[in-house]
Amino acid sequence: ATLEKLRRITFTLPNRNVVSLEQVARLEPAIGPSKIWRKNKQRMIQVSANRGRYAFGEAAQRVYDAIRELPFPEDYYWRFGENYWKLLQNQRELRFALALSLVLIFLVLASLFESVLQPFLIMVTTPLGAFGAFLALRLAGQALNVGALMGLILLGGIVVNNAIILVDEINRFRTFGFRVKRAVMQAAVSRLRPILMTSLTTILGLLPLALSRTEESSLWAPMALVAIGGLSLATLMTPIVVPALYLILHDMIRSILSLIPFRKQQNLPRTVS
């Protein structure tokens, strides 16, 4: 309870003699740690802080930039806590999930359209959505955290819907006998309003999540922001990029087939204007 009682603590030596602590040690008041931490049988000091508005990954990067050049005494070193390594593991798993989701989307499209080229044409919208997502994060000053990666996975399944509607409509007009250029133009005009309607319902539905400023919004706000930014840019570019690429792809296929000497001209499908 007191320093004086601490001085009088006794120890029994191997030869049965009894000594007090003040006989073998000098006790002096000084500043020291209130608690001794150990990990893996090594003494450690844990330093923590509130990261405020910064994302976990960005805060860790700022800490690393500030401390990497700091000289330490001999046998001293530093490292991040377990939460940082769990964050890196979660990011690796989400990147794998993103790649797997794109592969699964392509397989589903290939089975539905019974083609390999048209799914590639539809998947062109995913880079457009990714560019819009990163642009939205840049403008909002957000980092690519776990919530943003979840938003990219969500975006991969949403952003292709407009291209699916458009390509399916082009194929439908071509079955009616329309020429390719006429079918592309007619489909782009007729499907513009459905594309805008479906995109706006998704964007407006995610807008409250993107504008949320609660404590839990650090996860779902970047996710909603990524989905809104990617879907907005993809909606604007899909009616322009997909028809243009459809025409280019069709011309390339016809040019390649025209080089085959044994292909007969009468086997080509008839078209009407």
Image (cartoon, helix red, strand yellow):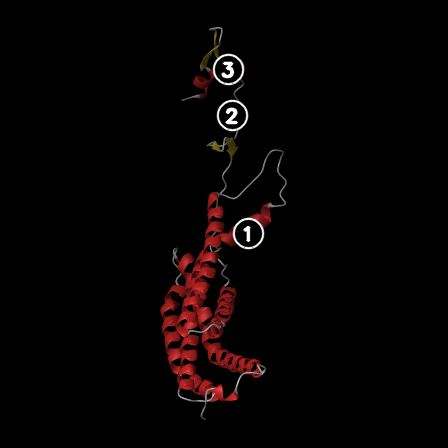
46 to 221, vertically: above or below = above
Outermost residue to the front: 262
Looking at the rendered image, the quarter that the N terminus falls into is: top left
Q: Are marks 1 and 3 in contact (CB under 8 Å)?
A: no
**Sequence order check: which comes first, mark 1 or mark 3?**
3
Is residue 258 or residue 206 the one in the foreground?
A: 258
- Residue for badge 3: 22
* Amino acid type of the residue tagged 1 in the rendering: Gln
- Residue for badge 2: 29
Per the image, label 1 sits on a secondary structure element best described as: helix
x and y percent of residue 4 in the render? 45, 18
Q: CA distance from mark 3 to mark 2?
A: 14 Å
Per the image, label 2 sits on a secondary structure element best described as: loop
Whether residue 159 appears in this view of the structure is: no
Per the image, label 3 sits on a secondary structure element best described as: helix
x and y percent of residue 140 in the render? 49, 65
Tell me if mark 3 has few (under 14), some (14-19) or many (20+) residues whose alpha carbon lies within 10 angstroms of its own. some
Query: For the point 42% across and 82% down, which residue is it?
Result: 171
**Sequence order check: which comes first, mark 1 or mark 2?**
2
Nearest to the eye among marks 1 and 2: give it. Answer: 1
- Residue for badge 1: 61
Q: CA distance from mark 1 to mark 3?
A: 49 Å
x and y percent of residue 201 in the render? 36, 73
28 to 189, vertically: above or below = above
* Amino acid type of the residue tagged 2 in the rendering: Pro
* Amino acid type of the residue tagged 3 in the rendering: Glu
**Sequence order check: which comes first, mark 3 or mark 2?**
3
Whether residue 264 appears in this view of the structure is: yes
Nearest to the eye among marks 3 and 2: give it. Answer: 3
Tell me if mark 1 has few (under 14), some (14-19) or many (20+) residues whose alpha carbon lies within 10 angstroms of its own. few
